[in-house]
Amino acid sequence: MASETVAQEGAARKVSLREELTARRKAMTPDIIDERGLKVQSRFLAAPYYQKARTVALYAPIRGEVPTRDILIAALQDEKIVCYPLSHVHGRILSFRAIKSEAELEPGRLGVREPTNSAELIPVDQIDLFVVPGLGFTRDGKRLGRGGGYYDATLKAASARSRRVGLAFGDQVVDTMPTTNDDVDMDLVVTEAETLRGLYRDWDFLDT
């Protein structure tokens, strides 16, 4: 029974932390999001994980998430395969399609931009680097999502050689976070001011 109580307390703390972090995000103006977002993306593009990756999974931002447009433009120029998740999910694992230009993203069922159905499907186990959104992160790479668990399930289903980087604004970094065995940690968390080491596994991951 004690373990059940601990699990219930952890779940309750996650709910209150989500509410707090959602409020922080809503307090950010579009100008602040754009300004800080440029710095986050620039710092991410300088990371060896990005430079070594051949296939990169991005996300289309919603409700105050860190923008990813600069990363998309750079990755296409660098001739990487760039894919985005689809809104319709079979089970818990996200499906991804590759795009060749930003014009191939259009609003999906949930209003989030996603690739058109004509875009090429990319198997999850072929993705080298996952760029992951989140409501909050800790300095050692723990992540709090919106509660659906889709990214956690997807990252667990990915190749063991894949890596994951969380993008966040400094306001989203917290000292502690309740976790379960279903939660997946990040290799790096990149903010506008610093790059935080999480798992920080070797970035020569394509050779492993």
Image (spheres, helix red, strand yellow):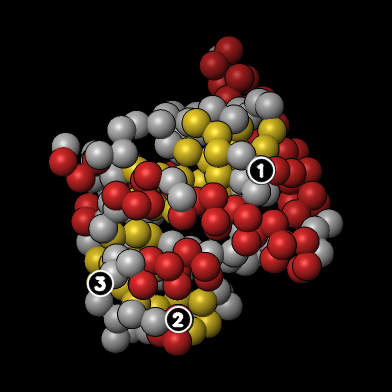
Cα gap from disc 2 to disc 3, whole angstroms:
16 Å
In the rendered view of the protein, which quadrant contains the N terminus? top right
| Above or below, comparing residue 119 to residue 198 in the picture | below
Q: What's the residue at 69%, 57% (across, down)?
A: 36
Task: Name the residue that disc number 1 marks.
Answer: 193
Amino acid type, callout 3: Leu
Q: Quadrant of residue 85?
A: bottom left
Q: Secondary structure at mark 1?
A: loop
Q: Quadrant of residue 124?
A: bottom left
Q: What's the residue at 46%, 50% (across, down)?
A: 46
Q: Are marks 3 and 1 in contact (CB under 8 Å)?
A: no
Task: Name the residue that disc number 3 marks.
Answer: 121
Q: Position of residue 132 (x, y in %)?
A: 48, 52
Q: Quadrant of residue 16?
A: top right
Q: Nearer the viewer, mark 2 or mark 3?
A: 2
**Closer-to-camera residue (42/139):** 42
Badge 1 or badge 2: first in the primary sequence:
2
Could one spot residue 124 in this view of the protein? no
Q: What's the residue at 54%, 50% (across, down)?
A: 43
| Above or below, comparing residue 66 to residue 12 in the picture | below
Residue at the far top in the pictured view:
2
| Number of marks present in the image shown | 3
Amino acid type, callout 1: Ala
Q: Nearer the viewer, mark 3 or mark 1?
A: 1
Cα gap from disc 1 to disc 2, whole angstroms:
27 Å
